Image: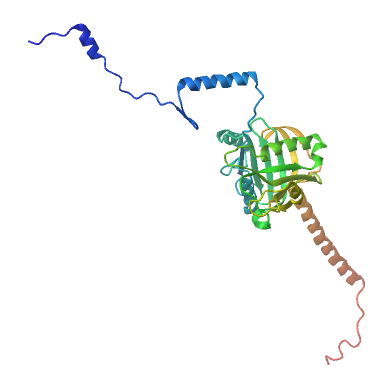
Amino acid sequence: MAKKRKHSETAAAAVKPDDSAPERPKRTLLGFKNKDEAKKEKEKENENENENPNVFFRNKEKVLVTCSRRISYRYRHLMLNLVDLLPHCKKDNKVEAKGSKGTALNELVELKNCSSCLFFECRKGKDLYLWMSKCPNGPSVKFLVNAVHTMEELKLTGNHLKGSRPILTFSSNFDQKPHWKLLKEMITQIFGIPKDHRKSKPYHDHVFVFSIADDHIWFRNYQISCPHSGAQKLDRGDLEKMTLIEVGPRFCLNPIKVFGGSFGGPTLYENPFYVSPNQIRSLEKRKQAGKYAKKVKAKTRRKMHELENPLEVDEFADMWKE
């Protein structure tokens, strides 16, 4: 007969060894880290942040670019040109401009993890409005876009790297009035490409020029061209020989209103010199209607004159009929 096992032996046989694989350490760009090392690094980072909270600032600006439905092809090409110039932007589908567009756009910006929005709104297939907004708390500006010329239309000789960072230049008029200062700050945040962005290149080879003339903001894009051959470095004396070559696109922004919130809210500034395109078209129609009324009045005057001053009967009128 078989011998009975002792209780200690049965307990040892019941405990099975753990055959599961050990937990994989955290993977980083420089290799693998264990949990203890990762915890120590996090504690050090938190201590450094508590000691020096304002040492390092990283710009994480992202811009959502979208448009309304029934936009014309020229305005759509202008929007695509701006998308090519801004590597830190995200493109989205068309949005219905009627109804509560503000809430829909704010939700889209939140879903896309963006902080700003450029919304191209086309009305009647003729008028283009540009909404420039900081989401979700504002402020926001509504512009009327005039003098639109796309890159495909201009065919200029300038050319620069796609995704390179621009140098933003502003005319001295931006520092004269408070609403121009606000617009300057919004433009620098939206059009300024963050440093070390994953889609941008660490070069400055073009310039964005924003200038004020006749209470309008005029936009130009220039390439910085340098006279050098091959891989030779530029001397300091050659920096004075740099020239600017226009690339495009071109457009003009007429500010209408500045709002305190995102796509609405209290009005901070209203342009007193703004005239809507509908009023301009109605005035032109009235002028044309005035021309027609003048023609009708001239015809009636001519008839009255002929009745008041009839022609005398000619003696020789029927001589050749006989």
Numbered label tally: 0
Residue 54 horizontal/vertical position (percent) = 67, 24
Residue 71 in sight: no
Residue 209, x across and y down, in percent: 74, 46
Judge whether 108 appears above or below 312 on screen.
above
In the image, taking residue 152 as reference, residue 18 lies left or right, namely left
Residue 169, visible in the rendered structure: yes
Q: With 54 as the anchor, is 285 left or right in this view?
A: right
Residue 42 position within the rendered picture, expressed as x and y whole percent measured from the top left: 54, 21
For image coordinates 65% across by 39% down, the residue present is 193
> Foreground: 170 or 114?
170
Viewer-closest of 128 and 252: 252
Q: Residue furthest top?
A: 7
Residue sitting at x 59%, y 18%: 47
When asked about the image quadrant of residue 254, the answer is top right
Image quadrant occupied by the C terminus: bottom right
Q: Residue at x 81, y 41 (%)?
A: 172
Task: Give residue 192's quadrant in the image.
Answer: top right
Q: Is residue 144 above or below residue 32?
A: below
Q: Position of residue 61 (x, y in %)?
A: 63, 35
- Say left or right for 151 vs 20: right
* Quarter occupied by the N terminus: top left
